[in-house]
Image (spheres, coloured by chain):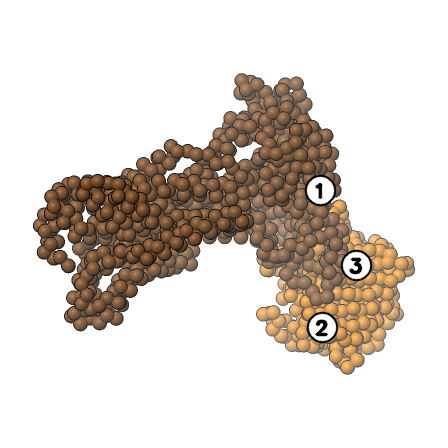
């Protein structure tokens, strides 16, 4: 299931300093490499909270990933992304400058007209980026995801702050449902060969706050989705990228669905989440994706509108992006932006496409 | 018609190839020296800029700690978390075996992309770099380094020598910085509305971008020096051009007249002459630039050695050819020719159509002009004196130099004229009187060449005196300062500990040479520790100091500072300075420290290890009886298998230091010879010019019965007399120049003052060289005179104009 391998990050950081185009031959952002001394997710090992909200430095990569679909009083729509990636050069922690952990932040604000992007890089061990528990905080530089609860569900109420060159946002997120374990109780398989990650989500956030576009603050409300995922080797070597959807249905149900592309038919997966948070993992083949419109984005053709069907659930929708050009021009670039959909039902969500 | 006229004008040169050669050589030499010096300067400056932007990221603002203790990681994190885009650097000197390298530890993640000095290609490279196992160095440094243990050496051609980029984690570990940051680079993109830095980190001071790096400031004097030399040569070259064009115009007066009479308009004639000059200037300019390139290429290794020896600045020994340099060289040739021939052109422009040619009119300076020139010379000298008394700074020093040289040069014709007048009054006999009077008459025509000679001679005497004084002081100082017989460097701390143990009892004294690099009074300097040992009490040369200097040092209460620091910081013995780590020490004395561009502090060894326990303890000076040195050295090598470079005896070190010194001033010597050569050529071309037009003055003397051979001898005597007078005048000017260099320019440029010493034998040698040059330059004109046919002399009377 699942897999939202947006990881970008990672070794990809690496790519930031490097030449463009590590090439996709080794999977997106070097994710299709082996585990090399890092821990790997174990099937059947239950997740434990609140510890698992914090970093797992024995695993190669990890992220705290929030996407939000927002609306202003005048009806204008916005998308917001706040992501903190952790990528380890070696397993474990060390003091100060010897720390092998590298942190990457991505922040984006999407309007119908523009897509604003910012990126931050930091190394661990010196206080520039990291995670605090009790209360929860994930931060890199002045970007911050700050919890208010000192006990219980640490992620129930959080605030989200990020600033880029021409944009900023300050949002308050309140969970209106439980945490959702993806895959088999948080063990999410990413390929037929069995690559997997640990993965859970909080798809039920209600959002209030303001976004600042070119210096003008706008009050907004909406809904947000948090993904937490860590692994050491999430992709098979022949997998070159993925198309990933998170959908807030009008009924209050949520859907996470993705397709990992490879030389053949690809690996698809989905999770149908009831309005009360009960997940129902769907098997590969139960969800069907079909591009309906492409656009030229950053010099390449990308399928920005999709026909998505889950016949078993009566879902038959067509998604349209708020902005075709939702290109994350960061070290390891990818497409990530808010979408809306209509068909058998309506709603909003996020689409992520990598490896094009 | 026009073309015919032009070829008629040009035909002049066919009959006087020597004159053409003189003109071409004059322009080419002037251009060559000027552009050669410019090439050296721009190459060196480009290399400083590269070093500054690469090593110090000086294109960006920087944050430094006010107390010199380094910046805490927490301060860095606080700034980042407040939104400031800053990037940390830990840097310092580190020894890999016997190779000393400047380590620059950067954080590749937060370093602004524009400040990254080298590419990291591939994720594995970055993982290696950030993982702290990689040194990135220049190709030459990689060769010197070999294979340091546990580290991988990557080569980047863009980096300056003797520096290595490493991950900040590795720098922290190797330098034992304990996480303390040397500085923070402030990124160019900062978001709006950030809280002020002073509020988050009050202990930090902002150093604005583009602040001239130390090395640029330090080497300014050197480049100014080169420029001065180049300019001097250029001016002397222009003298040559001036006299050569003047002569060619004078000799063609008849041609001009004829052409005009045949109907060539004045405008066309002038245009033709301008075209002819520009053609010559272009050809000579190209020759000059090529010549300049070779001069620069030949001098650059020497310049690189000088800069390294004096300032520790690293400049590549190879010259890169820059197009703007070609353009500038040819432009200066054309411009120089234009300036130096403008007077002659003006004369043609204003010449009455049918005026008779006036012999020597071009060279005759009116008495009024001479008075004006003398007044200007006096004003310049007075100005130089005033600036010397009142001015400060390097620019003032060079202003004094300029005023002194130009003023003296301008005064020279007056002084010579006075001397000749005096000689004329004192002499008896018609021929002798005629000799002096005629010499005086020739003075205006020769004065430019003589001024050039004066400039060259006095520059030679001045610079030579400075270098010799410096050498004398330096050698004496080396003898005192290098008191230990053997200098040993251990490869690591464990070996150093074994070494100390083994040495105890085997030598008369072990003198640790330990130092740390810290910021004192806002400057990165070395702090040395000295043992309480009679070696220092007996030998260490002090410029100032209380009687109990060494006791105060041993007790940890006192410190010695070097002359550079003493002068630049205006510190006085008895004053207290705040040391890094927040303790105070009293300045007990001052020592001279030649060859070191930076400040230095010496404290007691105990104080050093107490306040800076992380000091590396690898180097030692050993006192043993001189006859035991060779044997002891062998045993030391046997016992520890130390590489040769790690054990240096006193004699070798002195030889090395002297070699560095000599190399440092080899460029000065080369430039001296070149300027002298140009001055000699100026004299030659002037005499040649004069000899061609002097027949009307000599013919009557010949007619009165003086033989041609005697006339020729008189010409030689005249040249020698003028040379002698100029040389005598050059000595005081040169000594004044030396004084300015030693007491004003050196103090400003290097921070040390040197006693002046006189070397009359050197002057005599120089005088001899100049005499030979003068005699060579008079040879051709004299031979011409000695062999002129009587008919030629007679014709003078027939053609009397």
Which residue is the site of mark 3?
A138
Q: CA distance from mark 1 to mark 3?
A: 42 Å
Q: Residue at x 82, y 72 (%)?
A: A208
Label 3 packing within 10 angstroms: few (<14), some (14-19), many (20+): many
Q: Nearer the viewer, residue B763 or B158?
A: B763
The orange chain is A
Q: Are marks 2 and 3 on the same chain?
A: yes
Quadrant of the image containing the N terminus of chain B: bottom left
Q: How many marks?
A: 3
Q: Quadrant of the rendered structure where residue B635 is?
A: top right
Q: Nearer the viewer, residue B683 or B229?
A: B683
Q: Quadrant of the rendered structure where residue B510 is?
A: top right
Q: Name the colour assigned to chain B in the rendering.
A: brown
Say which of marks 1 and 2 sits in front.
Answer: 1
Q: CA distance from mark 2 to mark 3?
A: 25 Å
Q: Residue at x 63, y 26 (%)?
A: B537
Which residue is the site of mark 1?
B578
Tag 3 subunit:
A
Q: CA distance from mark 1 to mark 2?
A: 47 Å
Quadrant of the image containing the C terminus of chain B: bottom left
Above-or-below relation of B324 to B125: below
Q: Secondary structure at mark 3?
A: strand
Return the x and y of residue B524 as percentages of the image width and height: 64, 44
Return the x and y of residue A67 as percentages of the image width and height: 76, 68
Residue A215: mark in rendering: 2
Q: Nearer the viewer, residue B739 or B145?
A: B739
Q: Residue at x 50, y 33 (%)?
A: B473
Above-or-below relation of A291 to B575: below
Q: Secondary structure at mark 2?
A: loop
């Amino acid at each position: 299931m699942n897999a939202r391998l947006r990881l970008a990050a990672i070794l990809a950081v690496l790519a930031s300093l490097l030449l463009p185009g590590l090439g996709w031959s080794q999977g997106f952002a070097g994710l299709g490499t082996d585990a090399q001394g890092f821990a790997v997710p174990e099937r059947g090992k239950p997740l434990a909270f609140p510890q698992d909200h914090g970093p797992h430095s024995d695993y190669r990569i990890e992220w705290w990933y929030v996407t939000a679909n927002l609306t202003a009083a005048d009806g204008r729509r916005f998308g917001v992304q706040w992501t903190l990636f952790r990528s380890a050069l070696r397993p474990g922690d060390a003091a100060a400058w010897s720390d092998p952990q590298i942190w990457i932040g991505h922040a984006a604000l999407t309007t119908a007209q523009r897509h604003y992007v910012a990126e931050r890089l930091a190394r661990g061990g010196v206080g520039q980026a990291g995670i605090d528990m009790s209360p929860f905080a994930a931060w890199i530089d002045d970007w911050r995801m700050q919890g208010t609860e000192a006990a219980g569900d640490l992620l129930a109420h959080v605030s989200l702050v990020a600033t880029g060159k021409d944009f900023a946002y300050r949002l308050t997120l309140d969970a209106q449902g439980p945490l959702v374990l993806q895959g088999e109780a948080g063990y999410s398989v990413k390929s037929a060969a069995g690559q997997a990650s640990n993965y859970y989500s909080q798809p039920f956030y209600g959002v209030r706050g303001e976004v600042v576009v070119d210096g003008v603050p706008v009050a907004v409300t909406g809904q947000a989705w948090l993904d937490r995922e860590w692994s050491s080797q999430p992709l098979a070597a022949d997998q070159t990228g993925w198309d990933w959807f998170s959908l807030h249905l009008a009924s209050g149900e949520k859907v996470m669905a993705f397709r990992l592309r490879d030389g053949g038919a690809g690996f698809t997966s989905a999770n149908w989440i009831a309005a009360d948070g009960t997940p129902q993992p769907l098997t590969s083949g139960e969800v069907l994706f079909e591009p309906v419109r492409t656009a030229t984005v950053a010099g390449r053709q990308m399928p920005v509108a999709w026909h998505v069907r889950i016949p078993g659930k009566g879902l038959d929708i067509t998604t349209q992006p708020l902005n075709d050009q939702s290109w994350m021009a960061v070290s390891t670039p990818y497409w990530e932006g808010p979408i809306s959909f209509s068909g058998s039902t309506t709603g909003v969500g996020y689409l992520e496409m990598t490896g094009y | 018609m026009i073309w015919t006229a032009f070829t008629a004008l040009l035909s002049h040169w066919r009959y006087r190839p020597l004159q053409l050669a003189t003109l071409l050589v004059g322009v080419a030499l002037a251009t060559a020296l000027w552009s050669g010096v410019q090439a050296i300067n721009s190459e060196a400056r480009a290399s400083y800029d590269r070093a500054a932007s690469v090593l110090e990221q000086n294109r960006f603002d920087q944050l430094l700690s006010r107390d010199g203790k380094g910046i805490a990681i927490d301060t860095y994190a606080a700034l980042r978390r407040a939104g400031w885009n800053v990037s940390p650097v830990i840097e310092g000197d580190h020894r890999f075996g016997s190779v000393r390298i400047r380590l620059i530890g950067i954080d590749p993640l937060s370093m602004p992309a524009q400040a990254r000095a080298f590419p990291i290609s591939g994720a594995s490279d970055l993982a290696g770099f950030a993982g702290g196992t990689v040194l990135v160095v220049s190709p030459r440094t990689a060769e010197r380094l070999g294979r340091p243990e546990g580290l991988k050496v990557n080569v980047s051609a863009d980096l300056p020598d003797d520096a290595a980029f490493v991950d900040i984690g590795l720098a922290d570990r190797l330098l034992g910085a304990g996480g303390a940051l040397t500085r923070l680079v402030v990124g160019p993109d900062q978001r709006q509305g950030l809280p002020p830095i002073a509020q988050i980190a009050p202990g930090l001071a902002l150093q604005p971008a583009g602040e001239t790096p130390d090395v640029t400031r330090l080497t300014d004097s050197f480049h100014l020096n080169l420029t001065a030399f180049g300019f001097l040569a250029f001016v002397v070259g222009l003298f040559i051009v001036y006299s050569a064009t003047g002569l060619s115009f004078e000799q063609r007066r008849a041609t001009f007249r004829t052409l005009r009479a045949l109907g060539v308009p004045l405008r066309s004639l002038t245009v033709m002459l301008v075209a002819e000059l520009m053609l010559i200037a272009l050809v000579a300019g190209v020759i000059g630039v090529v010549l300049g390139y070779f001069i620069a290429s030949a001098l650059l290794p020497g310049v690189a050695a000088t800069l390294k020896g004096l300032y520790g600045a690293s400049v590549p020994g190879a010259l890169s050819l820059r197009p703007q340099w070609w353009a500038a060289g040819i432009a200066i040739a054309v411009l120089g020719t234009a300036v130096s021939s403008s007077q002659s052109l003006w004369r043609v422009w204003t010449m009455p159509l049918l005026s008779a040619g006036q012999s020597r009119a071009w060279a005759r300076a009116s008495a009024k002009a001479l008075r004006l020139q003398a007044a200007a010379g006096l004003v310049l000298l007075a100005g130089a004196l005033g600036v010397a008394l009142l001015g400060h700074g390097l620019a003032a020093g060079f202003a004094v130099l300029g005023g002194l040289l130009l003023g003296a040069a301008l005064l020279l014709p007056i002084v010579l004229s006075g001397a000749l007048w005096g000689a004329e009054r004192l002499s008896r006999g018609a021929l002798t009187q005629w000799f002096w009077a005629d010499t005086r008459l020739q003075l205006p025509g020769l004065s430019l060449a003589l001024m050039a000679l004066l400039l060259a001679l006095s520059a030679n005497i001045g610079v030579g005196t400075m270098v010799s004084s410096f050498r004398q002081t330096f050698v004496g100082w080396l003898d005192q300062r290098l008191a230990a017989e053997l200098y040993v460097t251990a490869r690591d701390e464990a070996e150093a500990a074994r070494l100390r143990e083994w040495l105890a009892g085997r030598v008369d004294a072990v003198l640790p040479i330990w130092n740390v690099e810290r910021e004192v009074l806002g400057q990165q300097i070395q702090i040395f520790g000295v043992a309480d040992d009679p070696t220092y009490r007996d030998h260490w040369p002090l410029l100032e100091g209380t009687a109990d200097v060494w006791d105060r040092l041993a007790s940890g209460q006192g410190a010695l500072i070097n002359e550079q620091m003493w002068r630049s910081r205006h510190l006085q013995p008895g004053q207290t300075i705040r040391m890094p780590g927040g303790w105070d020490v009293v300045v007990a004395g001052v020592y001279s420290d030649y060859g070191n561009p930076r400040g230095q502090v010496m404290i007691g060894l105990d104080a050093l290890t107490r306040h800076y326990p992380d000091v590396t303890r690898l180097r030692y000076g050993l006192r043993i009886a001189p006859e035991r040195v060779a044997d002891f050295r062998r045993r030391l090598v046997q016992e520890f298998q130390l590489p040769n470079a790690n054990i240096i005896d006193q004699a070798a070190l002195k030889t090395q230091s002297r070699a560095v010194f000599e190399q440092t001033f080899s460029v000065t010597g080369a430039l001296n010879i070149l300027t002298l050569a140009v001055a000699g050529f100026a004299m030659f071309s002037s005499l040649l010019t004069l000899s061609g037009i002097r027949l009307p003055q000599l013919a009557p003397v010949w007619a009165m019965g003086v033989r041609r051979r005697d006339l020729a001898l008189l010409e030689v005597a005249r040249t020698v007399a003028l040379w002698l007078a100029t040389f005598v005048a050059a000595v005081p000017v040169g000594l004044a120049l030396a004084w300015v260099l030693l007491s004003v320019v050196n103090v400003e440029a290097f921070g040390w003052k040197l006693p002046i010493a006189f070397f009359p034998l050197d002057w005599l040698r120089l005088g001899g060289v100049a005499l030979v040059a003068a005699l060579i330059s008079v040879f051709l004109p004299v031979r011409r005179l000695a062999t002129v046919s009587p008919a030629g002399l007679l014709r003078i009377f027939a053609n009397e104009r």
